[in-house]
Image: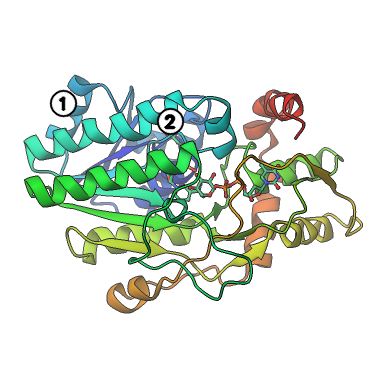
Amino acid sequence: MRVLVTGGAGFIGANFVRRTVETRPDVEVVVLDALTYAGDERSLDPVRDRVDLEVGDVADTDLVDRLVSAADLVVHFAAESHNDNSLADPSPFVRTNVLGTFTLLEAVRRHDVRLHHVSTDEVYGDLALDDPARFTEATPYNPSSPYSSTKASSDLLVRAWVRSFGVRATISNCSNNYGPYQHVEKFIPRQITNLIDGHRPKVYGAGANVRDWIHVDDHNDAVWAIVERGVLGETYLVGADGERSNLAVVQDLLEIFGRDRDDYDLVADRAGHDLRYAIDATRLRTELGWVPRYTSFGEGVARTVDWYRDNEAWWRPTKARTEARYAASGQ
Ligand code: NAD
Ligand code: TDX
């Protein structure tokens, strides 16, 4: 089987590619990635001799048509993924997330190729901190940011192409991922690398916002479960019961580094900052038999800290540039 992985040089995509190559010898992987600031070819190094990397844009009709025509399955990770960047300049988000998904949908329609579309729980908006509810597949869409609204748009395109044209597709909406090879702009790697450098973690607002953390390998196992056992046209929520306030995460990290619990800085809040995300993954668990392997956030995050300690050469080149951007916006 030949799988086309868009965004396969990014955080989740590269973890997906490495895991797929290492555990599924029958699968041939082709990566389509534009190698934006967020993509890094080195994330594929461990499996580089077994992966074909095409550097290009998911919104390039001719390139996408050629690659899709030769694939049995497309797993679509490519996106602009960072909320803070979408507030500074939304335009690449509209282009890649909306136009890119449209381009891919037209190609899978022409060639009748199976598609799995990777999306986010942020399409549902946010929940109050004290709301007992969690997101389910039936929660109405209510995105807040330029990033989440473009992801919501891409999901709606996929749903419409399924219904109108019979495209064979599934969708997953996952909560916040952590693990190795995540860009240092994101919350957990930013704080880990700050601590490695002896700096204080930077917490937006009062740190009360809650995210529902899942290890990237558990997310990618869910993607394969949906590809292999999911019902065409359906949506599956992916989450591992990992709700934690940002402050609690920072305090876990401070403890790992042997620093004082109060050794962090409160910085300017994100505009429109979603309060809380929480996933009810009952459907994925009961219908597809998926279970997360990383059930202890503390252990998963400690292993992630080890990875950043051991792989400074991977993140060091982007750290100073990323921090300069944050400093310019008071964060
Ligand atoms: P990332 O930013 O680390 O990686 C995105 C990859 O897409 C990069 O390699 C980049 O070069 C590539 N890319 C960007 N624009 C492109 C274009 N026009 N053409 C081709 N490639 C392009 O993102 P990530 O965190 O790995 O997220 C991957 C997917 O998972 C995204 O669709 C995101 O919405 C979704 N998601 C992420 C999370 C999370 O916590 N990170 C949670 C749920 C869903
Ligand atoms: O320095 C920081 N300090 C801080 O308090 C940063 C970078 C973030 N935060 C907060 C903002 C959020 O409440 O931490 C939380 C997590 O922030 P991000 O890592 O930027 O993630 P989030 O905005 O929640 O979105 C992530 O999860 C859903 C991914 O970036 C998305 O691609 C995914 O769809």
Could you tell me how far apart the alpha carbons at marks 1 and 2 are, in whole angstroms? 24 Å
Find numbered disc 1 in the image and state the secondary structure of the residue it sits on.
helix
For residue 75, what is the image quadrant?
A: top left
Is residue 76 at all visible to an observer of this figure? no
Colour scheme in the image?
rainbow
Q: Which mark is residue 66?
A: 1
Amino acid residing under circle 1: Arg
| Ligand 1 within 8 angstroms of badge 2 C-beta | no
Decide if residue 10 is on the left or right side of residue 139: right
Q: Residue at x 13, y 44 (%)?
A: 113
Q: Residue at x 34, y 65 (%)?
A: 137
Quadrant placement of the C terminus: top right
Q: Residue at x 7, y 35 (%)?
A: 110
Amino acid residing under circle 2: Phe
Is residue 306 at all visible to an observer of this figure? yes
Instruction: Kindly identify which residue carries mark 2.
Output: 93
From the viewer's perspective, is residue 189 above or below residue 30? below
